[in-house]
Amino acid sequence: MSREDFKESGILVQDIMTRALITVNLSTTALQVAKMMQQGGIGAILVQDNDNPVGIVTDRDFATRVAADTLPLDTTVEKIMSSPLITINHNEPISAAAERMTSKKIRKLAVTENGKVIGIITSTDLVTQLAK
């Protein structure tokens, strides 16, 4: 698939996103999240406050905030999460997801439908699609 094919593919975010979400609350610790990521083989967990998504903790957050700043593992996710949560609508084309990730310099987007988070799309999802 060429770059132009990618832009004109007609493939929507909902077609390649992951629907399985793991969420935690603001008081969850960095260690707890790290164990969840390890057990689930995932690189991001959404953070909620009273069932409202407020941020995301990614593997990159661990590298740049926990490890680099030598924060203790009992630090709450509220202190290490990326916030505000950057989202994309489920019926947007995947090229829009790629453009948003590039402009925001991020690798994961929460996917919404009618304002509710229903999934996540990653740069890996986009690369996998491009390689097909």
Image (cartoon, rainbow, N blue to C red):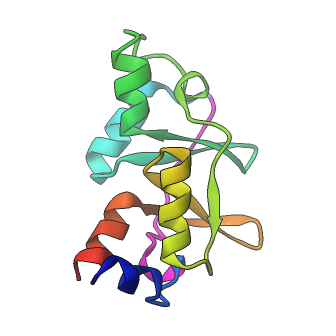
Q: Is residue 70 left or right of residue 38?
A: right
Return the x and y of residue 51 as percentages of the image width and height: 72, 50
Relative to 47, is 26 above or below?
above
Which of 53 and 35 lies nearest the eye of the viewer?
Answer: 53
Q: Residue furthest front?
A: 4
User: Going 35% across and 76% down the picture, which residue do you hit?
Assistant: 3
Return the x and y of residue 102 as percentages of the image width and height: 48, 53
Return the x and y of residue 110 as percentages of the image width and height: 57, 58
Residue 120 visible to the viewer: no
Residue 17 part of the magenta segment: yes
Relative to 119, is 27 above or below?
above
Q: Quadrant of the image for the C terminus? A: bottom left
Q: Is residue 55 left or right of residue 11?
A: right
Which of 87 and 66 lies nearest the eye of the viewer?
Answer: 87
Which of 97 and 37 lies nearest the eye of the viewer?
Answer: 97
What number of labels is visible?
0
Return the x and y of residue 97 as percentages of the image width and height: 52, 66
User: Going 46% across and 66% down the picture, which residue do you hit?
Assistant: 20
User: Going 35% across and 15% down the picture, which residue do you hit?
Assistant: 68
Q: Residue furthest left?
A: 131
Relative to 131, is 64 above or below?
above
User: Going 28% across and 47% down the picture, which residue do you hit?
Assistant: 39
Q: Which residues are magenta?
A: 14-26
Q: Quadrant of the image for the N terminus? A: bottom left
Which of 127 and 19 lies nearest the eye of the viewer?
Answer: 127
